[in-house]
Image (cartoon, rainbow, N blue to C red):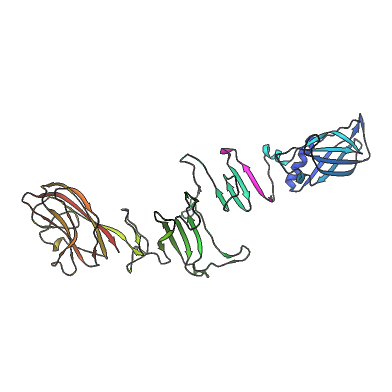
Amino acid sequence: MNSKFLLGVVILIIFINFICASSDVSVFQGQYYKGTQFQQGTFTFKFDIYDAETSGNLLGSYTKNISTGYWGQWKTELTGLSSICSDTTKDYFVEISIDGTIQSPRRRLTHFDYLRKDINETTTGSIKVESEIKVPLITNDVPIIIQASKVGIGLQTTPLAFLHIIQETNSTVNIGTMIDAYTYDTVVGSGIILRKARGTLANPQPILAGDTIGYISTRGYGTNGFSLGGIGQGDIRILATENWIGNSQGKKIQFKTTARGSNTMIERMIIDENGINVTGNIYSNNKLVCLADGTNCLSGGNMKIPVRFSSTSDGILIVSTSYLPFSIGGTAKITASPASTIVDKNLTVTGILWNAASIDGTDISKVTLMKSTSSKTSFIDTNAFVNMQGVTKGSVLNFNVNFSQGDLMVLKYSGTGGSQRVTDLSVTVIGYYN
């Protein structure tokens, strides 16, 4: 018995309909004839699904009573076929029998995965994934995994966070995450917004004082693997400072680092809801100010604002004692009073640096920081001094001399030896307001 079925093109169209409709319904149609005679009537069709062109495993079976038309044409729908043929790495075949007679050979089933490789497709509605989606990209062969409500880029395993990105490269470019914004707006730009609520998605609740709103953290790889949460990290954290009710939404920023030889983070700085307060005086509208000389801005809970005072004297300093004002291109004075400067905030002096165009001789040539706590006529030497002795450039940075707001300070130059001369001396006193 010769029978012929026109299946190939029709099956492709059917599976496109299945994808767009988001339903597991497959449509088969063809013509039934013997020799040159079309068969019209009602016949018993059986559709057996296998995983091989011959032999193989029977995966499913459908039996239908189908009525053919004048030209032997027939059409039927099979439900659940896509679920049976769900492994896109395998081939599947259908064996059709009519009234108990097998219509050889088996026909290959082309399912939706093969269509999607080469044909652009537009769909509406939603796609539900029960386990995971793996999308190998053409560029650099970077896979994308969507699994258990988590997205992984560049992973071969389950993502460890809601978004987990891995990039392995020896290049110094194209590493990290980039966000571009194109706008004429002066406020809107590229950014990351971290939001936090108590409760659940269906019933969110206000956050409370002490709650972490969001944080940025780093974790490095050591001999024991990547550091765990709260261990061996750097951390910038934003916390609520009150229960958030209405417009009461106070918060602070906390900075933590880890010391050498340790894996425990330590809080180094906090900018609270009132900003920065320096020794009872508001500094620069409560803003944190750190100068560029590398001095700490915060240590042991006390604010340190780095500061420097410079004195540059034109001309030659000789053996006799003279006093250097804190100014550029100033003239040395024979008394301390006209050269002195008022300290405007509580001050700690930590070092003296000097540089001279030339120094004749190696006799003692000292620069001493003097202090007065009362009048401009009663200065005393502090223990902050340097002895240049022929060295034109140098520094001493281990002082700890304290001044209170309103004190006076001045630099005193003194030398010994008849031939000692210092030309164009520049001196800088460094320290910090506290």
Q: Nearer the viewer, residue 146 or 122?
A: 146
Classified by dominant secondary structure, the portion drawn in magenta counts as loop
Looking at the rendered image, the quarter that the N terminus falls into is: top right
Magenta includes 16?
Answer: no
The residues colored magenta run 120-141
**Residue 20 place in picture, x, y as percent:** 73, 46
Q: How many marks?
A: 0
**Residue 117 place in picture, x, y as percent:** 67, 38
| Residue sitting at the far right | 41
| Residue sitting at the far left | 418
- Residue at 19%, 48% (x, y): give it: 393
The quarter of the picture where residue 286 lies is bottom left
Q: Nearer the viewer, residue 400 or 333?
A: 400
**Residue 62 place in picture, x, y as percent:** 85, 44
Magenta includes 125?
Answer: yes
Q: Nearer the viewer, residue 229 or 344?
A: 229
- Residue at 44%, 61% (x, y): give it: 254
| Residue sitting at the far top | 36
**Residue 197 place in picture, x, y as percent:** 56, 64
Looking at the rendered image, the quarter that the C terminus falls into is: bottom left
Image-based side of 99 in relation to 56, left or right: right
